[in-house]
Image (spheres, grey):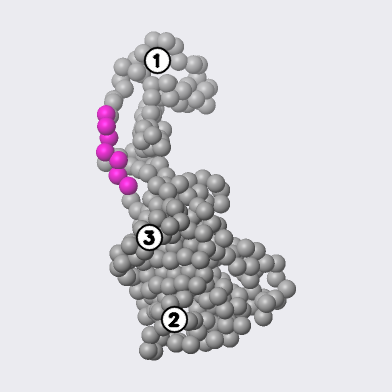
Amino acid sequence: MNDRCIICNNLDAEFTLEHIIPFALGNNNFSLRNVCKKCNSLIGEKIDVYSTNNIMAELMRMTKKVPGHSGKIPFPFAKGKTEDGFTVKLSLEMKPTIEPKVSKNENKYNIIAGSHDEAINIAEKILKRNGKPPLSKSAKEIILSKVAHKEHPRINYSFELNINMLKIEAIKIVFETVVYKLGTSCLQEAVVEKMQNVIFKYIYEDVLDIEFLNENVSFIDGAMFNSIRDALQVTFKEGIFHIIHFTVRENDTVVTVIVEGMLPMAVKLDTVDLINNNSLIIVGYPGNLLINE
């Protein structure tokens, strides 16, 4: 099955590099090449995007300076709203500027701008568009005399976190990790085929198997891994560590997924003979650390 895409089973597809943990979360080399170009694109657009662009991920990427494919580092506070509904842009230096807004009531224009010069420029454009002459010096003075200032506005932000999308990201990570460790022959295993089908159904048919996600993916307390991270940082001097750990129990296998920028999760696999107990993947960034035990 080496010539088949591990998502859609397409033969003779054009394969591309698929990052098992999203590249934008700090993963340069934990990847595989058994995903076709179309599936790779759909995974990025419909699964990975929620994991890399939510508030937790963007805060992590901002503080640890992790760029995306565009080379840009996100700034989640770039745009917010004041209490009276005006949009405010915030620079990386935390300097606010109000986003220009023009409203009209009969023959009067109300201009919201970040500076006097910007307000005058907007007024000049309105006059030009309406075939009117430029503002005279006295007219500009009259306009500026009516300026209302708003000092130190309170900026409000609204963020959403889609729990189900984080869960399907965890399924994708576990599925691709299993294929990475065992090869494509494992796709014949029922538990692996089920994960493959869940991913395929969502990216191609917009069908999200909520029941499967709720039964097999749970959020956990990741505090116990903090000491592991501390030890890893002393040894390897990396800024980011992602940890994927397999624990074989009596009736199933639990995969602990600790990915920075995501909530810690446990994925239950209904099998005990797929992956060896205590199998471990550690991915470090920015130094391309990859430990596979």
Residue under pointer 3: 231
Residue 46 in view here: no
**Residue 263 position within the rendered picture, expressed as x and y whole percent measured from the top left:** 36, 64
Give the side of residue 173 with respect to residue 250, left or right.
right
Which residue sits at x=36%, y=64%?
228
Considering only order in the chain, which callout, 1 or 2, is on the residue closer to the N terminus? Answer: 1
Q: What residue type is labelled 2?
A: Asn
- Structural distance between the alpha carbons of marks 3 and 1: 64 Å
Residue at 42% across, 10% down: 137
Instruction: Read off the residue under disc 2.
Output: 277
Q: In the rendered image, is residue 113 in sight?
A: yes
Q: Is mark 1 on a helix, strand or loop?
A: helix
At label 3, the amino acid type is: Ala
Instruction: Decide which of 288, 138 is in the foreground and name it.
Output: 288
Mark in the foreground, 3 or 2:
3
Q: In which quarter of the image is residue 240?
A: bottom left
